Image (tube, helix red, strand yellow):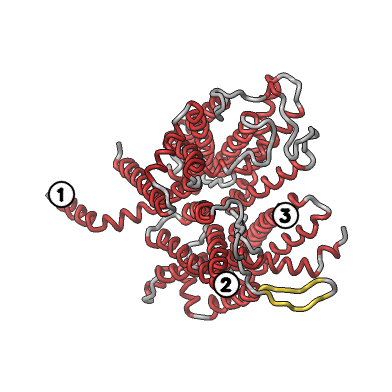
C-alpha cells in the first residue's frame, strides 16, 4: 500500500470515528443515551430479514448515485443536479410505461429504461454544455435545475399527466402489474432492480478505472488544459461524464417508481441523490471506495429510521454526521500540517542528515 | 391576462420584499468573492439565520433578540467557514456544498428535537414577533408597507459600494483576493482580510435568514431557504461582485418571482415557481454570451 493511501485511510477512519463521537455528543445533549441510540441503529439496520433487505437496497441506491457523482467529477464537472435528473427520468419512464400498458413487458421495460436514460442524460447535458462552452459554474446551474425539475414534474403529475383513476389525488396513471419489479424479500425495499443497479455500477466503475476513456476523463478533470495539449478532446470527455451521470440518475428514478411505487409520485425521492453525493465526496470520488462505503452509510441511513421511531432521535442526525466527516476530510491536509508541523520539521532534519551520510 | 396586473404596485412591493433576502445574502457572498474565497455555503447560512432568528424572537418575545440570535449564529457560521477555508485550506466548493446540507440537516434536527415539531414551526404559546413594518399609506386599494429590513438592505448596498471602492479597508479586502502577496508586502495580512470577509458574509446571510423567518414570513419552515442562496451566488457572478450591479440582478430576480406570483391566476402555480430559477440561469447564460462576444471584439481589434 502506498504511503499516500495509508495516510488517506487513516484520516478517513479517524474522521468517521470523530464524527460518530460528535453524533454521540449530540444525542447525549438532546437527552438520549448515545449507546442505546447506536444499538437501536444497528438492530434497525440488521435486526430482521426485512431490515437487511432495506439496508441492501439503500446500499445499491448509494452506490449508483455515488458513482454517478464520481463519474461526472472524474471529467471535471461537479454534478449537484442528480435529484432533478432522477425526477425527469422517473416521469419520462412512468409516462411512457402507462402509455404502453397492456403490451409485453419485454417491449415496454427496455423502452421505458431508454426513456429514463435519455431524459436524465439530456437534463445533465444542459449544465455540462453551459460549463464547457460558456464556463458557467455547474454547481449553481445544477442545483437550480433541481428545483426546476421537481416543480415541473409536480406540475405534470398534477396537471397534464394526472391519472384519471378515481381516488388518486396526484400522480401519473398506474403502471401495468407486469411492468413492476417484484420484491426479493417480502416487506422490504429490495427489488429485482438491485441486480441492474449492480451491473450498471460495476460497468461504470470499469469504465472509470480500467479504460483509456476513463483515464482521459481523469486527465481532463485534473487539468483540462494539459489534457487538451495531450491531444484529448477535453470538452467531449467532460460532457461524456455528465451524460453518464445523468443517465444513471434517470435510471434510478425509473427503478424507484417501477419497483417501489405503482406510478410516478411527486414525493418518490427524499433527496436520495444527495445521500450518494455525500458518500462520493467523503470517498473523494474513488469508485471502489464509494462501493465499499455505501454499505456502511446504507446501514446508518436505514438504522436511523428505526432509531427515530424507537428513541425519538431525528434521523437527520446521520446527515449531520456525514457532513461533519466531509468537513474533517476536507480540512485534513491543513489539520495534519498544523498538528505535524513540529514533527515534520524534525523528520526533515533527519532526512537531510540521511542524505549527507 | 393583461400586462397591467403584472406591472402593478403590488407586484412592485412583492419584488422589493422577495429580493431583499437575495440582496442581503448576495452582499455577504460578494465580500468573500472580493477576498478570493467565494462562499457557496450561503444557502446554509440563510437557513441557520432563519432558525436562530425565529427561535430568538419566539423565546424572548422581541424581534431585536431574534436579530441578536441570528447575528450570533452568523458570526459562528462565518468563523466556521473561515477557519476551514483560510486556516486549514479546505476546498471552498466542497465546504460550501457540505455546509448547505449540514445546515439543512442541523436546523431540521433542532426543530424536531428541541421543539418536537416537524415541517414547520407552530408555537403553542407566544409567537414569532415580526420585524416592524413601515406603513406608507394607501394607493388605490393597495396598502403600501415596507419592512425596515428592506430599507436596511438598500442602505447596506450603498454602504458596501462606498466601503469597497472608497475606503482603504475595502481596497485591502479586494487586494487580499486579487494580489495577496502584494498586500503582504505592504505589511497587511491577507488572512485577516479574509476572516473579516467570511465573518461579514456570515452576518449578512443570517440577517437575510432572519428577514425570511421574521419579516417575509413569521415562522420557520424546514428547508425554507429554497436554494435562494444559490440564486444570490448567481447574482454575484452576474454582477462581478460590484454591489450596484448585483443589486440590479437581485431586483430582476425578485421581479421574476413576483410576476410569477401574479400570473398564478392564469398559469399553474407549480409552473410559475420555476420562473425565478429559469430566469437566473438565463441571466447567467446572457452574461456569459455577452462576455464572449466582447472578447471576440477585442480579439478582432
Total numbered circles? 3
Q: Which mark is residue B62?
A: 2
Earlier-in-chain disc, 3 versus 2: 2
Q: Which residue lies under the disc numbered 3? A: B275
Q: Residues within 10 Å of mark 2 (few under 14, many from 20)?
A: some
Between marks 2 and 1, how big is the CA–CA gap?
68 Å
Please give the chain letter of the residue carrying mark 1.
Answer: A
Please give the name of the residue rendered at 51% of the width and 46% of the height, measured from the top-left corner: A76
Q: Which residue lies under the disc numbered 1? A: A354
Between label 3 and label 1, give the one nearer the viewer. 3
Looking at this view, name the residue that lies furthest to the front. B125
Q: Is residue B283 visible?
A: yes
Please give the name of the residue rendered at 56% of the width and 68% of the height, measured from the top-left corner: B57
Between label 3 and label 2, give the one nearer the viewer. 2
Between label 2 and label 1, give the one nearer the viewer. 2
* Label 1 SS: helix
Residue A17 at x, y = what percent? 35, 45
Please give the name of the residue rendered at 41% of the width and 59% of the height, measured from the top-left corner: B84
Q: Residues within 10 Å of mark 3 (few under 14, many from 20)?
A: some
Residue A304 at x, y = what percent? 48, 41
Between marks 3 and 1, how big is the CA–CA gap?
66 Å
Residue A18 at x, y = what percent? 36, 49
Please give the name of the residue rendered at 70% of the width and 73% of the height, measured from the top-left corner: B146
Amino acid at each position: 500500500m502506498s504511503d499516500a493511501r495509508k495516510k488517506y485511510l487513516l484520516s478517513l477512519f479517524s474522521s468517521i470515528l470523530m464524527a460518530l463521537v460528535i453524533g454521540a455528543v449530540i444525542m447525549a445533549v438532546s437527552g438520549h443515551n448515545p449507546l442505546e441510540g447506536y444499538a437501536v441503529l444497528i438492530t434497525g439496520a440488521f435486526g430482521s430479514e426485512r431490515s437487511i433487505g432495506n439496508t441492501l437496497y439503500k446500499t445499491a441506491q448509494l452506490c449508483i448515485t455515488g458513482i454517478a457523482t464520481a463519474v461526472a467529477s472524474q471529467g471535471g464537472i461537479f454534478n449537484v443536479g442528480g435529484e432533478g435528473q432522477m425526477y425527469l427520468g422517473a416521469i419520462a419512464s412512468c409516462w411512457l410505461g402507462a402509455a404502453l400498458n397492456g403490451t409485453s413487458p419485454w417491449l415496454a421495460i427496455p423502452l421505458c429504461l431508454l426513456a429514463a436514460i435519455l431524459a436524465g442524460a439530456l437534463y445533465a447535458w444542459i449544465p455540462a454544455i453551459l460549463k464547457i462552452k460558456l464556463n458557467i459554474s455547474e454547481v449553481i446551474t445544477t442545483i437550480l435545475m433541481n428545483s426546476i425539475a421537481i416543480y415541473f414534474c409536480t406540475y405534470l403529475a398534477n396537471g397534464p399527466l394526472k391519472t384519471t383513476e378515481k381516488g388518486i389525488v396526484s400522480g401519473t396513471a398506474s403502471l401495468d402489474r407486469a411492468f413492476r419489479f417484484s420484491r426479493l424479500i417480502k416487506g422490504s425495499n429490495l427489488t429485482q432492480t438491485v441486480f441492474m443497479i449492480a451491473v450498471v455500477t460495476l460497468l461504470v466503475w470499469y469504465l472509470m478505472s480500467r479504460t483509456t476513456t476513463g483515464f482521459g476523463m481523469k486527465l481532463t478533470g485534473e487539468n483540462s488544459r494539459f489534457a487538451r495539449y495531450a491531444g484529448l478532446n477535453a470538452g467531449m470527455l467532460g460532457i461524456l461524464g455528465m451524460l453518464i451521470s445523468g443517465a444513471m440518475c434517470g435510471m434510478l428514478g425509473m427503478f424507484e417508481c417501477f419497483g417501489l411505487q405503482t406510478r410516478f409520485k411527486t414525493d418518490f425521492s427524499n433527496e436520495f441523490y444527495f445521500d450518494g453525493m455525500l458518500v462520493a465526496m467523503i470517498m473523494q470520488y474513488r469508485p471502489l471506495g464509494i462501493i465499499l462505503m455505501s454499505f456502511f452509510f446504507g446501514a446508518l441511513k436505514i438504522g436511523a429510521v428505526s432509531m427515530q421511531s424507537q428513541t425519538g432521535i431525528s434521523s437527520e442526525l446521520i446527515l449531520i454526521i456525514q457532513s461533519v466527516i466531509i468537513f474533517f476530510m476536507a480540512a485534513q491536509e491543513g489539520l495534519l500540517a498544523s498538528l505535524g508541523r513540529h514533527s515534520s520539521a524534525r523528520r526533515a532534519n533527519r532526512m537531510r542528515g540521511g542524505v549527507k551520510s | 391576462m393583461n400586462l397591467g396586473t403584472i406591472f402593478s404596485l403590488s407586484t412592485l412591493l412583492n419584488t422589493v420584499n422577495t429580493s431583499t433576502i437575495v440582496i442581503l445574502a448576495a452582499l455577504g457572498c460578494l465580500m468573500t468573492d472580493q477576498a478570493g474565497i467565494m462562499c457557496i455555503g450561503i444557502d446554509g447560512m440563510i437557513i441557520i439565520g432563519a432558525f436562530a432568528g425565529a427561535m430568538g424572537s419566539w423565546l424572548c418575545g422581541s424581534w431585536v433578540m431574534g436579530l441578536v440570535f441570528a447575528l450570533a449564529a452568523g458570526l459562528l457560521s462565518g468563523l466556521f467557514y473561515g477557519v476551514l477555508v483560510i486556516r486549514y485550506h479546505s476546498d471552498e466548493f466542497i465546504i460550501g456544498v457540505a455546509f448547505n446540507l449540514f445546515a439543512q440537516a442541523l436546523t431540521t434536527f433542532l426543530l424536531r428535537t428541541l421543539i418536537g415539531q416537524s415541517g414547520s414551526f407552530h408555537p403553542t404559546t407566544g409567537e414569532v414577533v415580526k420585524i416592524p413594518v413601515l406603513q406608507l399609506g394607501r394607493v388605490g386599494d393597495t396598502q403600501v408597507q415596507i419592512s425596515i429590513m428592506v430599507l436596511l438592505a438598500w442602505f447596506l448596498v450603498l454602504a458596501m459600494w462606498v466601503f469597497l471602492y472608497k475606503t482603504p479597508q475595502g481596497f485591502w479586502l479586494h487586494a487580499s483576493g486579487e494580489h495577496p502577496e502584494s498586500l503582504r508586502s505592504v505589511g497587511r495580512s491577507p488572512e485577516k482580510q479574509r476572516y473579516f470577509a467570511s465573518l461579514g458574509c456570515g452576518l449578512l446571510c443570517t440577517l437575510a435568514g432572519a428577514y425570511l423567518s421574521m419579516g417575509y414570513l413569521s415562522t420557520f419552515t424546514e428547508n425554507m431557504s429554497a436554494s435562494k442562496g444559490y440564486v444570490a451566488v448567481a447574482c454575484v457572478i452576474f454582477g462581478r461582485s460590484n454591489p450596484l450591479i448585483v443589486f440590479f440582478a437581485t431586483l430582476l430576480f425578485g421581479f421574476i418571482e413576483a410576476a410569477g406570483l401574479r400570473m398564478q391566476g392564469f398559469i399553474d402555480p407549480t409552473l410559475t415557481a420555476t420562473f425565478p430559477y429559469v430566469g437566473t440561469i438565463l441571466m447567467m447564460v446572457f452574461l456569459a454570451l455577452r462576455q464572449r462576444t466582447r472578447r471576440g471584439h477585442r480579439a478582432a481589434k
